[in-house]
Amino acid sequence: MRINRFILKFSCLLLFCVFLYSGCGVMPVTKQREFLMGTVVDITVHNRDAAAAGKAVEEAFAEAKRLEGMLSIYRPDSEVTRVNRSAGKEAVRVSEETFYIIEKAVEFSVISGGAFDITVLPLVELWDFPDGGRVPSDEEISEALELAGYRGILLDREDSSVKLTREGMKIDLGAVAKGFVVDRMADILRGAGMSGALVNAGGDIYALGTSYSGGGWRVGLRHPREKQKIVDVFTLEGRAAATSGDYERYFTLDGERYSHIIDPVSGRPARGVMSATVLAETCMEADALATMLFVLGPEEAESIIQRFNAEAVIFKEGWEYGEEKRI
Ligand code: AMP
Ligand code: MG
C-alpha cells in the first residue's frame, strides 16, 4: 500500500485572489505580511496618514500573536492546551476571549446538529493530519469517537472556566479561531480610524471600509480544482469571507482523497464537498459556517445560511464551474 502525501499548507492562499488597484489614488498604501496561525497573514491599509497606518498594522499583528499564544494547540503553554491537559480532572480558568470562542463553538455545534464540533481533535490526530496522514482501523475510530462530543464541554461563565468531562478529550479551535483573530485585527484597524483595510489570513478575510478604487474590496473566488478559473468576484465592504476546502490539507491513498475536516458522526474525513465559501458579517461566523457546510453539504446549507446574514458558494465533488450551489 502506497501513501501519497500532500500537505498543501498554503494552498488556501490560492483560493481568494485580491484585486488591488495601485497608483490610481493619492492615498498611501501600507502593506505588511507575517506568518501566524500556520498561515501567511497579509494586511493592506489604505489611509491618508501612512505613519498612523503603520502603527495600527503593528498593533493588529501584536494582538494576533497574543491571541495565538492563548488559542493554539501547538503551544504547550496555551490556554487551550491547559484545558486539554486537564480533561477529566478539573475546570481551567481561561481569558474572556478563549471562553467566548469556545462558547460560540458550542453554539455552532448545536446549530449544525453536531457537524461542527471542536472536540474532534482525537480523531484529527488519529488520521494523523498533523504528520501527513494514515487510515486508522475501525476499532481505533470507535475509540476516538468515544472521546468526541461537544456535550462533554462544560462552561462556567461566572468563573470563566472550561472543563472537558472525559479524560483524553481534546478541543481544537482550528476551524473558528482564525476568523476570530481576523475580526480582532480588523477591530484594531477600525479603532485606529483607518479608512480602508483588508486582513487576509490564508483566505480568512475581513474587508474594512473602502479600497483603492473608492468602493469595497474586490476579492476573487477561485475554482477548487482549476486554480486559474475565477468563479466569482465579491465586493466586500464591512464584511468577511472564509473557505473550507478539501485541497487545504489532505492525503491520498489508492486514489481516494482524505481531507482534514472530520465528520463527527462517522469519525472519518467528511466527503462529497470540494469547497464551501461563506460571506458573513464577521470572519468568525464565516470561518465556522464554512467548516460546517463542508461537513453538511449543499442540501442542508440553506436553512443554516438563512439564520445568519450570510451567503454561500458550495462545490460538490465533480461539480464544474457553473454547477456550484449559491445561497
Ligand atoms: P477549517 O479549515 O476552518 O475548515 O478548519 C479545519 C480544522 O478544524 C481542521 O484542521 C481540524 O483541526 C478542525 N476540524 C476538523 N473537523 C472539524 C469539525 N467537524 N468541526 C470543527 N472543527 C473541525
Ligand atoms: Mg473554518
Image (cartoon, rainbow, N blue to C red):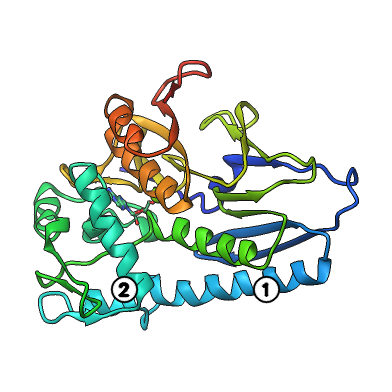
Q: Secondary structure at mark 2?
A: helix
Which disc number belongs to residue 231?
none
Please, which residue is most extreme toward the top here?
Answer: 322
- Above or below — where is 16 with respect to 109? above
The residue that mark 2 highlights is 80
In the picture, residue 326 is in which quadrant?
top left
Q: Is mark 2 within 8 Å of ligand 1?
A: no
Residue flagged by tag 2: what amino acid is it?
Answer: Val
State which mark lies toward you, 2 or 1.
1
Measuring from the top left, give residue 212's x and y in whole percent. Answer: 79, 45
In the picture, the quarter occupied by the C terminus is top left
Q: Nearer the viewer, residue 120 or 126?
A: 120
Q: Secondary structure at mark 1?
A: helix
Residue visible at 36% across and 83% down in the picture: 77
In the picture, the quarter occupied by the N terminus is top left
Residue visible at 76% across and 43% down in the picture: 20
Q: Nearer the viewer, residue 121 or 278?
A: 278
Let me know if residue 254 appears in the view: no
Residue visible at 13% across and 82% down in the picture: 90
Which disc number belongs to residue 58?
1
Whichever of labels 2 and 1 marks the residue nearer the N terminus, that label is 1
Residue flagged by tag 1: what amino acid is it?
Answer: Glu
